[in-house]
Image (cartoon, rainbow, N blue to C red):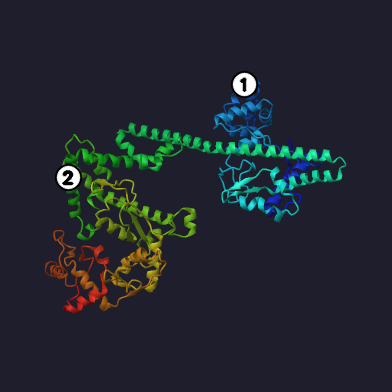
Amino acid sequence: MPVTARSDKGSVSRRRHKGHASNASSAGAGETRKNPARLPKTPKRERARVAQANGPSNVDVTHAQASALLSLPLDVIFEILSFLKPLELANLAQTSRAFRTTLTTPRSPKIWRSARQHAGNAPECPQRMSEISWARFLYGSVECEECGVPNLRNLDFVLMRPMCDQCKPDTLLCGCCLSDYFPGVDCAVLDLIPHVHVESHPWAKYYLDADIVAMATIYGELQRDIEVNTRKAAAKKALHQFKNERIKHVHAVLEHANKCTQWLREFQVYLDNEKQDRIEQYYNQIVRRFRELGYEEQDIQAIRSKSEAMCDRAVTEQVWKQIRPVLQTRVEMARCKRLDKDEEAIITSRKALVRNAYDAYKLTLRPLERLHTPVPELIYAIPAFRALIYMNLDALLKQTACNEAAQRLPEYLSAFNDQLKCCLLQSMLDNGAFDRGARRAKQLPKNADARLSLATTVFKQVIPRKLDRTFFSYNGVVLGMKMLDIWKLSCQADFWVAMYETQGREMEQPTLSYDAHASAAAKTFVVQLGLDHAITRSDDMDDLNGRFVCQHCKHREFLGILRDKAYSWRAAVEHHIIAHTRSNLPMFFKALNEDEVKIVRRIEDGLRLQVWMCNHCPSYNVPATFYDVQEHLTTTHAISKPEENSDYFHAFPAFRYDPPPQSFSRCLQLAAAVDPAEDG
């Protein structure tokens, strides 16, 4: 059966430079092989010998091991090699001339056949390829010859080359365009060469330019023999026989390609099953280690949804040291939730003792400092208190043990704040808050902590089945953790555990990440106010305490009510992200003047009058009106000119700086209906 030799002579390939260069290089290599005298004389290169401290060099050891294996009988060598996989055999053939000779002898097909059976039962090697090339083609990590896409698995078994579907239309020639690129070539040539199909045009047949040129050359010579040769009958018979052989060859190639394509799909399933088996073994090893630590099976099952517990690798000591803190936190969380239900009475009584110790600790703080203390649910999750609550349930827990653990609360809370800042900074680094150099180096730049207090640093809390919440700067995150009931866990801190339920159902853990879109909107808003976005903090924006009306929504109505709400700067940014980001509308807010702001704030303060507290009296912890707190400071503490956040403070700072937006037109109507009151 004749085999067509591919050549670029007379080719009008649309691959241009790259295709011609590759084919020209292959043709040059073939010409050099035909003429050994033209081989360049290169000096023989000696292999470097690396000496060892005790013993012979690496080269000597390698030769000794290879010679020891090759000194065995050939049948024994074949038996050993039959247990290897095809890619291992191909790599072994490249190590030495002896192994290559062994794996290319007439008896070697038995070894390759056995190796293919051990690795997915691959099809037989086609006649136009060697066993070594076939193994590398099937099992190697190949890349597209045209664009270089790595790990290509949609191999083309007709052309016997890796090529992605995106490159086929640009590299190959469609049969319907033959006359455009190869004028004068008979269309019957296309029946004598293999073709492939493309996903974008499944009905069309695509051919390799080099195949068309080579076959057109041979076919043209046979036709010329008919015209020139006097024995036309013999020439016609030769052409007819050649066409029949080529058509059979094309059918054989296409049939083998279909068989290989079907095998490749089954081989992918085979590889996936092997991978799943390795992952399951990895998971079982982790489960065994947690059982040895004393955890129960029902609690360990909680780690199956974690990516750290479902990996395709071996559980070495280094891997176990890396994944244990993450997975152990999840197991502890599952154990605590189970005990909350099974031992509800005991757990509730123990939490009450911890709560008493926590309340006693808060009495030692100034009232303003209590605003930044976490909710009790997070205190229960600290390892020291978690051990008191959930360990040794048969023993009686005393209040003195909880009080002793509470003495280290400042250390625990400081560690929590440091961990929270690290998580926020890492989220900023991962989501592009810093320059390209920091992202490329995966290292935080200097003075990165200062970015946490800027007004343009915005974080988003994603809560499943809930509306996302936005927090501005690190202080906004801390206040949000204190004021929101649903926030009862820290942001990915290692020693905090999520322990909350909604309507009797466990929720997934909310995540907190840097919001690039909201940060860009905040930056635009700060620039519109004439401030420097690089140094403007959220406290600076709060000191302005301005109100802003969205001009996009000013004249819109919803159920007969104007949507001219007066937003704080935080609410204005959040409103723009929710309402106008998808429409690609620019930020367009009108800042109210001082008189208009007073009118709006008077309506806002009317919703909650008792919002002020004294910062000098731990016992004076009930919010009161602004005038009552001022009188208390004057009479009790003899402070004639009290200062905010030093002598008195707002009991609900999140409500003060981000109140519910009020309709501006409605505020004007109410202000006109009643006499203006003193602004407090």
| Vertical position of residue 290 compared to residue 447: above or below | above
Q: Is residue 482 above or below residue 560?
A: above
Q: Which residue is disc 1 drawn over?
A: 76
Amino acid, disc 2: Leu
SS at mark 2 in the image: helix
Kind of residue sitting beneath label 1: Val
Give 511 or 289, whichever is nearer the viewer: 511
Image mark for residue 613: none
Q: Which circle marks residue 353 in the picture?
A: 2
Q: Position of residue 154 (x, y in %)?
A: 56, 43
Q: Is residue 579 visible?
A: yes
149 with respect to 627 (left or right)? right
Q: Quadrant of the C terminus?
A: bottom left
Q: From this viewpoint, is residue 545 visible?
A: no
- Neighbor class of circle 2 (other Cα within 10 Å; few <14, some 14-19, many 20+) is many
The number of numbered discs placed on residues in the rendered structure image is: 2
Labels 1 and 2: the sequence-earlier one: 1
Q: CA distance from mark 1 to mark 2?
A: 75 Å
Horizontally, is 213 left or right of 169 in the view?
Answer: right
- Residue 460's quadrant in the figure? bottom left
